[in-house]
Image (cartoon, helix red, strand yellow):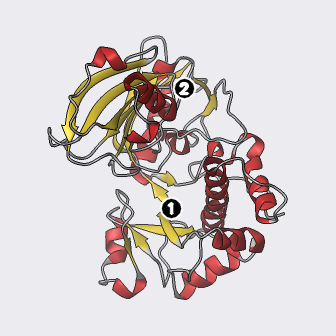
Amino acid sequence: METDLLPIPFLHGGPLGRARFKAVPEDFLVEELLGFEPSGEGEHCLLWVEKRDLDSNTAGARLADALGIRRRLVSHCGLKDRQAVTRQWFSLHLPGQPSPEPAVLESEGLRVLRVTRNTRKLRRGIHLGNRFTIRLRGPEFDPAAAEERWKVIALHGVPNFFGEQRFGRGGRNVAKALAMFRGAFQPRDRLLRGLLLSAVRSHLFNAVVAERMADGIWDRPLAGEVYGFPDNRSLILPERLRGDETERFAHGMVELTAPLWGSGELQSVGDVHALESRILGAFPELTAGLESAGLRQERRVIRLRPLRPVFRGLDGGDLELAFDLPKGTYATTLLREFASLDEDRADDADSFSADGAG
């Protein structure tokens, strides 16, 4: 069936063993990398906020309520995982009003670390990425093997799969999306509709990457590739190649991409166009549903490399991993190639954890 989630293959031989993940929020630290310094003036008040066991949307609602302003006047760059300690920026639209004192805004699990101003509001996806510091407790595998695996991951990266959190409990979001396309299910709000559409796009993207891995060409350029830059969403279309893309790919300067499906023609040509058309031709209702929903063809790089990777062995045998990732990517996509994570989760079937991806 089109909605059956495909098994996601491993690149580096599978996880080394089990480890406890997110035993407490402090085991998963996420710090947003804004990528620019606020101007220090303007009608938008920017807050550098630390959240503990608190999701981004709830934090934004609390900030609005504390000031008695409409929630739409509070914005942020991206969603961050709830089961974590996260630091991220929020902006409040306060034209002609002074910046509030931190104490007015703080509540349980929410601290304001810095207050400044900016000439523009924060919009989704304008930040650079996220810095992760992750503690894995009680690893059931050899520390030396763990350090060696981390070096391999840092050097070669991992396939940039969308993780299970994108698909809801039991992977049911894709099936719900198909029911929505058929008119048998109506989402209760725009947010849920967006989550279902994202699940379908992610499902199809994963299918292309998994097939390229199975064919041994996930990291081998073919004729007709669309290249992308790993630290942003800019693309190099086939008609704009300058001739040195294969060399730049070998040095990690550009990466291969796969489709995020929508209306319009595939941006790949030649062998890659034929490959992607064959794979995605197995999902006619899902592709048609995305096109009818008004989404347009986009692309995403198919390799994920950690930036500034650090490996530390801690007293008592725990491990700590630290690394940066570009926005829109998942720490758990990296970790699944390292260890099987034992985590207590209570995800809503219709939601997904941002995992610092936002």
Residue in front for this viewpoint, 262 or 301: 262
Q: Which residue bears the numbered disc 2? A: 83
- Crowding at dot 1, Cα within 10 Å, few <14 / some 14-19 / many 20+, comes out as many
Which numbered dot is residue 302? 1
**At 29% across and 31% down in the image, what residue appears?**
47
**Quadrant (top left, top right, bottom left, bottom right) of the C terminus:** top left
316 over 187 or under it: above or below: above
Task: Give the image quarter of residue 133.
Answer: top left
x and y, in percent, of residue 181 in the image: 76, 64
**At 78% across and 53% down in the image, what residue appears?**
176
Element class at badge 1: loop
Residue 163 appears in the rendering = yes
Task: Give the image quarter of residue 95.
Answer: top left
Residue 187 located left or right of residue 309: right
**Count of numbered tags:** 2
Residue in front for this viewpoint, 252 or 94: 94
Which numbered dot is residue 88? none
